[in-house]
């Protein structure tokens, strides 16, 4: 299986993923991240970033409602975030890569895609279509890791030690296996694919965080429901999914 990298009329390189995630890699100065919020950060502001000095990333996620997350997630679990990895690039070594394709039209450079991993230690599996037995669940997030940026008082990103209810699905991301090919039939560049676990939709909208009052609430979801106790949330999920 492969992913398709297409050029838009404006010259931006767009990676189309099976998971419904679109990444636009723009040849710009600095590193920008846009994933549903207005945020732009340059390389000089990143603490431990190994990317190229001239790469920009613009991300957009399809809107997924709370009800859709409940109904479609492959795994819904409570757990503690035990690790948030640094930014890596989509190949086995994690190093940045790019490949230049030459043809009769000219040269095209296909760049790497950034990602990081969130490790969750499950405490209670509320719903599971996989039969998860692992002590640690690793969820892949496309984009640059929040641990590579200076922390702020208003940072709403996940942190180590956070207790959450996460909505997770099976998906695939583009994965460089040493070769990029051009498919003339689809006018697109193709790489390999890697199966991974992903959050449902925009990551910060795909979990509820446990507060000091013991209730779970979304931090960034527009249609913010009232805070839930774990019992209330579990009952709602079971009812929506038709679980006994």
Image (cartoon, grey):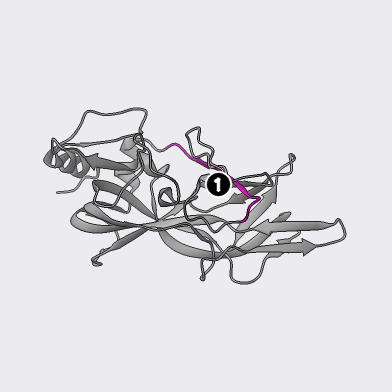
Residue 95 picture quarter: bottom right
Q: Is residue 35 above or below residue 183?
A: above
Q: How far from the left and from the top, in percent, is residue 211?
A: 19, 38
Residue located 52% across and 39% down the image: 34
Residue located 76% across and 63% down the image: 101
Q: Is 75 on the left-hand or right-hand side of 147? A: left
Q: How many marks?
A: 1
User: In terms of depth relative to the viewer, which is nearer, 211 or 51?
Assistant: 51
- Packing grade of label 1 (10 A; few <14, some 14-19, many >=20) is few
Residue located 62% across and 56% down the image: 52
Residue located 60% across and 59% down the image: 112
Q: Is 229 on the left-hand or right-hand side of 186? A: left
Quadrant of the frame with the N terminus:
bottom right
In the image, is residue 59 part of the stretch drawn in magenta? yes
User: In terms of depth relative to the viewer, which is nearer, 43 or 82?
Assistant: 43
Residue 113 picture quarter: bottom right
Q: Secondary structure at mark 1?
A: helix
Q: Is residue 4 visible?
A: yes
Magenta residues span: 52-63
Q: Is 192 on the left-hand or right-hand side of 28? A: left
Q: How far from the left and from the top, in percent, is residue 124?
A: 17, 54
Q: How far from the left and from the top, in percent, is residue 100?
A: 74, 62
Q: Is residue 22 visible?
A: no
Read off the residue under disc 1: 44
Q: How far from the left and from the top, in percent, is residue 127?
A: 23, 52
In the image, is residue 43 part of the stretch drawn in magenta? no
């Amino acid at each position: 299986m492969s992913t398709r990298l297409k050029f838009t009329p404006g010259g931006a390189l767009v990676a189309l993923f099976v998971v419904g995630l679109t990444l636009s890699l723009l040849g710009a100065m600095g590193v920008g991240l846009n994933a549903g919020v207005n945020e732009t950060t340059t390389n000089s502001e990143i603490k431990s970033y190994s990317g190229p000095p001239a790469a920009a990333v613009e991300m957009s996620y399809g809107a997924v409602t709370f009800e859709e997350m409940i109904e479609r997630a492959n795994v819904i679990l409570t757990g503690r975030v035990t690790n948030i990895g640094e930014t890596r690039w989509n190949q086995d070594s994690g190093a940045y890569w790019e490949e230049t394709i030459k043809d009769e039209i000219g040269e095209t450079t296909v760049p790497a895609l950034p990602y990081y991993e969130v490790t969750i230690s499950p405490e209670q599996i509320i719903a599971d279509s996989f039969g998860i037995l692992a002590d640690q669940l690793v969820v892949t997030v496309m984009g640059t890791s929040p641990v590579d940026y200076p922390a702020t008082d208003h940072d709403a990103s996940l942190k180590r030690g956070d207790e959450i209810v996460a909505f997770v699905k099976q998906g695939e991301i583009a994965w460089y296996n040493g070769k990029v090919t051009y498919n003339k039939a689809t006018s697109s560049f193709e790489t390999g694919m890697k199966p991974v676990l992903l959050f449902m939709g925009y990551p910060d909208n795909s979990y509820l965080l446990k507060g000091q009052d013991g209730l779970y609430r979304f931090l960034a979801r527009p249609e913010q429901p009232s805070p839930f106790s774990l019992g209330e949330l579990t009952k709602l999920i079971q009812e929506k999914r038709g679980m006994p």
